[in-house]
Image (tube, grey):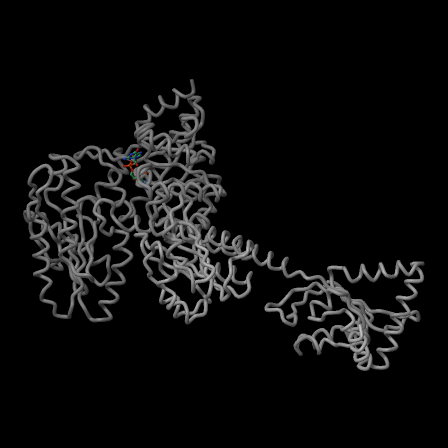
Amino acid sequence: MHEASARQRESDDFLTAETRRFVAATEAMMASTAHHLSEGVENLRLKAIIHELPDFLYVKDRDSRFVFANAVTAASLGLRRAEEIAGKRDFDLFDFEAARRHFDIEQQIMATGQARIDMEETVVLPGSPRPVCRLTSKIPLRNERGEIVGLIGVSRDITERKLQEDLHRGQAKLLEMIARNEPLPMILEALVLMIEAQLTGIDGSVLLLDSEGTRLYHGAAPNLPGGYSRLIDGVTIGPKVGSCGTAAWRGQPVIVEDVMSDPLWEDFRALVAPFGFRSCWSTPIATSENNVLGTFALYSREVRRPTEHEMRLVALATHIAGIAIERKRVDDRIHFMAHHDDLTGLPNRAFLKERLAGILDQARRNNRKVTVAYIDLDNFKDVNDGRGHAAGDEVLKEIATRMANCIRASDMVVRLGGDEFLVVLVHQSSHDAGIARRLRDLQKAINRPIHGASGEIAITSSIGVAAFPVDGATSEELLANADRAMYRAKQLGRNTLQHHDGDGAPLGMPLGEHEELHQAITGDQLFLEYQPQVDVATGRITGIEALVRWNHPAKGRVPPVNFIPLAEETGLIVPLGLWVLNEACRQARAWQDMGLAPVTIAVNVSAKQFADPDFASHVAEALERHRLQSHWLELEVTESVVMQDAERALAMMESLRAIGVRLSIDDFGSGYSSLAALKTFPFDRLKMDRSLVEALPGDKTAVAIASAVISLAQTLKLSVLAEGVETDAQMDFLRQARCEEAQGYRFSRPVSPEAATLLLQAQSI
Ligand SMILES: Nc1nc2c(ncn2[C@@H]2O[C@@H]3COP(=O)(O)O[C@H]4[C@@H](O)[C@H](n5cnc6c(=O)[nH]c(N)nc65)O[C@@H]4COP(=O)(O)O[C@H]3[C@H]2O)c(=O)[nH]1
């Protein structure tokens, strides 16, 4: 009591005469309020209410000195009693910059008489480790004569609310980053920073488990010391490997309160000690099937357990990290599948296209040669026909392995398709004499008899060789010339190796085929087959895909894979595609005219057609000519078609949508199918590729990818159709995964128009 009155005296001395007058006035005001409240008891109650208010309430004089503050204000400023604040200014309590800011605002309020309501301000309170955020109103205070004698301040701590808002914003930003396919390290770093911003004195880290599930690698740890992150990078997981290594091993969270005494840290104590961390709480990041993908850990320099709030943030972080990592894995897998051949595991044509130009660029810079060898197996068809596809597959795999063993790390073997391979050999010096020997070795390796399950198989090969830069300055020229040399090798009786001799023959396919295809389009050699698309739930036909065939006068029926690429290369695809479009529309109209329930007719569109500026008007004309309503026509394009010239493709798609036709993305999951294409282009439907469906439901990766593709499509409001459905097991999976439509041999092979009519009639009964 004695001490308190001494302190009061001290602060009284500190007050200016003006302040003293103001204090007196305030006291008078309080007294008069008390008077009005009729009883002294009431006055006490008012005081108690003011002091118990959770919000900050204070009165300042004209010099911005505190005259009065309620208990919570004083306590937040580190004062034990509310009275201690009288006479103090913000300059005594806050850092100079902050005090100056408050002072300027207050002086302006008192000079103008204009209150400032709901100002958001961030202040660092004495003894507090982190800034707090307040919503403050300051109102001028007047005496009975209306003169401004000070101000009243009311503030509310909104730090928690701000943190919550930041967290929601952060989450939305992260999900957007995932959807935009931004690099995983960037996403993980943003995630760790978001969690750290919510906490005090905590550093976060993400470690990623490798594909073998044995080691943890750096994912993101923006604020952990770099030296520490490097030390733990690549650690093998196990039952006693710190918090993260153990959490990944157990598949369960591991909370270590003190790394200096916990047995799990025994082998890592010396490693962590220099960095000062004392507790480390690690939680596995897992897939929806509970497969561990990595860990999310929080480090603190205090010996303690995490709070409930911290664990809630960890749960959020592991959830988001799981989505991001899983998404990236699916993408990588799709990318790998798109660039590798399933059977042999060799890179495919898409991979070659992506890499060869780069290899040639580098060779040009280093003044090196590059040799490409086009390899075609001579008697592969006999093996396939005579001994069956399994034997054929065995041959292809064995030859792929032998070729891969013959080349160096800088070289490349590609399976172009069927029994065609391409080898790219990068010369080690500008006079690499070893190339001829390596090519001979390659041919010898192929020609060695293969001891397969069906007995010994003898295979020979025809090889055509062209070298950069003499035989071609671009990938296209080089490949075309190697191809031509290979044809000559075949003509010369097979099992030979021919170099391009610069005979000046036109690039591209052998003469004659182009002419033949031209005749096929103008003559009557093309026809369409139709394959139904059915509703997975009801089994009803909802659409029909038109597939073109060529009835070759000499060779008989030619499947599209054998002439569509040639048509695309030569530009004949434009008239061919137009014929298909018109024929399909005509047939669809004919079915409607027969009184059958209308179904969508789907037509494949190739890149060259799509790039034709007149394409949309051709479509409109075809619809008009055959009196088909536009919504019954669906155009199927592959992702590569739209990605080639995204801007032009988007414009074309918009013109087509304006006409009212439906657009579907074909073969999704085979090419490098990215979310970007789905989001950018206005597709109505996604067709999941046959290669993916084929592996269902046995192959876990295919199941994961297919499920991801279906849910992705649903999120983007696209309908999904699974292609190439052949079995009941595939149907069961699709039904469970909520895939809406399916197409494949299980329902019907592509059939003649007459057979398709019967199928449609059957369901109209
Ligand atoms: N193993 C198996 N295969 C199934 C199954 N269900 C359907 N298929 C086959 O899968 C292909 C589906 O057509 P696509 O992906 O558009 O692939 C088409 C398409 O890219 C192209 N094509 C066909 N007709 C045209 C056309 O009129 N214009 C263009 N530009 N391309 C066409 O040729 C490709 C191959 O066509 P098709 O040989 O008719 O082969 C068809 C079809 O016969 C199944 O359950 N199992």
**Residue at x 43%, y 65% (from the top left corner):** 260
Which residue reaches farthest front? 2
* Residue 517 pos. (x, y %): 24, 41
Front position in the image: 719 or 648: 719
Which residue reaches farthest top? 765
> 98 left or right of 464?
right
Q: Quadrant of residue 709?
A: top left
Front position in the image: 14 or 320: 14
Front position in the image: 15 or 114: 15
Q: Quarter of the picture for ligand 1?
A: top left
Vertical comparison of 456 with 544: above or below: below
Q: Locate the C terminus and report the quarter of the image it occupies.
A: top left
Vertical comparison of 503 with 715: above or below: below
* Residue 433 pos. (x, y %): 9, 66
* Residue 690 pos. (x, y %): 32, 39
**Residue at x 16%, y 49% (from the top left corner):** 400
Q: Locate the N terminus and report the quarter of the image it occupies.
A: bottom right
How many tags in the picture? 0
* Residue 14 pos. (x, y %): 80, 81
> 265 left or right of 42?
left
Vertical comparison of 553 with 118: above or below: above
